[in-house]
Amino acid sequence: MYKIVYIDECQDDIDYFLEYFDDKDSGKNFNIKPLLPAENLDKMIDLIFQEDPDAIISDFLLNEYKTDIEYNVPYTGVELTERILKEKYGHPCFVLTSYDDDAIKTSQDVNIVYIKDILHGIEDKSNAKANFLDIVKNQILHYRKRIQDAENELLELVEKSDKQNLNAKDEARLSELDTFIEQSTDKKSALPKHLKGTKNLDALHKLIESTDELLKNLNQNNSDNASKP
């Protein structure tokens, strides 16, 4: 089961979205949680992460209609998804809009923007083999696989470190994988504490410090010699 949070300020469009997924999701693999946009971006982010969704889909103009909310929404769906991606790198995010030109101009990633008319049958009139639901599902699966592959590779390097000292390349990769997992999930770190201070990187830092000290001494000696009559 895949959980999707859908954000829209218009209840009618929320209903269209639910009808679309109910029609396309023949295997009943999706659980949809609709949310009205919150009064500010921080609160919206908190509400979304409380749901712990596999994918986040948002309308673009969240302040366009005032039929179901009475306050101004000071952010767009693009701003919302970009903030989410800063919190969770690579997380499946999508923006639906009737104003694709404006959304594409403001989005750092044009690939997350989709025409909202898909909710009204435009896909059925095209020759596309994959519908929007298929795209969402595959993005979720690819995201999960990237994280799982990273965790497996990190575990292999940790097990290797228990048997032998890692070389500089392995340690750099270990740190890279740890950072990726940390940025992609809620995990603060995937790396065991005893590997945080990697031996080769520590040695490299000490070498740099020694080199700096040596250069200072050489420069000082040259300066002293130059000042002698």
Image (spheres, helix red, strand yellow):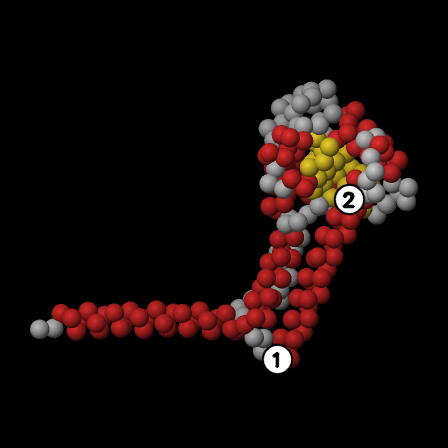
The quadrant of the image that shows the C terminus is bottom left
Within 10 angstroms of label 1, few (less than 14), some, or many (20 or more) residues? Answer: few
Residue 135 bears which disc, if any? 2
**Looking at the image, residue 94 lies above or below residue 38:** below
Q: What residue is shown at x 62% (from left), y 24% (from top)?
A: 72
Q: What residue is shown at x 69% (from left), y 21% (from top)?
A: 65
Instruction: Give the Cα separation between the discs numbered 2 and 1.
Output: 43 Å
Q: What residue is shown at x 21% (from left), y 72% (from top)?
A: 222
Which label's residue is closer to the chain start, 2 or 1?
Answer: 2
Image quadrant where residue 4 sits? top right
Within 10 angstroms of label 2, few (less than 14), some, or many (20 or more) residues? Answer: few
Amino acid found under the numbered disc labelled 2 = Ile
Residue 207 coordinates in the image, percent (x, y)? 41, 73
Amino acid found under the numbered disc labelled 1 = Gln
Q: What residue is shown at x 77% (from left), y 44% (from top)?
A: 136
Q: Which residue corresponds to mark 1?
A: 164
Image quadrant where residue 108 sits? top right
Secondary structure under tag 1 reads loop
Residue 61 coordinates in the image, percent (x, y)? 66, 28
Please indicate, yes or no, whether residue 18 appears anywhere in the rendered image. no
Which residue in the rendered view is the most extreme toward the left? 229
Which residue in the rendered view is the most extreme toward the front? 127
Tell me: 134 left or right of 190. right
- Considering depth in this image, is 76 or 48 the residue closer to the camera? 76
Please indicate, yes or no, whether residue 219 appears anywhere in the rendered image. yes
Tell me: 194 left or right of 53. left
Image quadrant where residue 176 sits? bottom right
| Total count of labels | 2
Residue 181 coordinates in the image, percent (x, y)? 65, 57
Proximity of marks 2 and 1: CB atoms separated by less than 8 Å: no
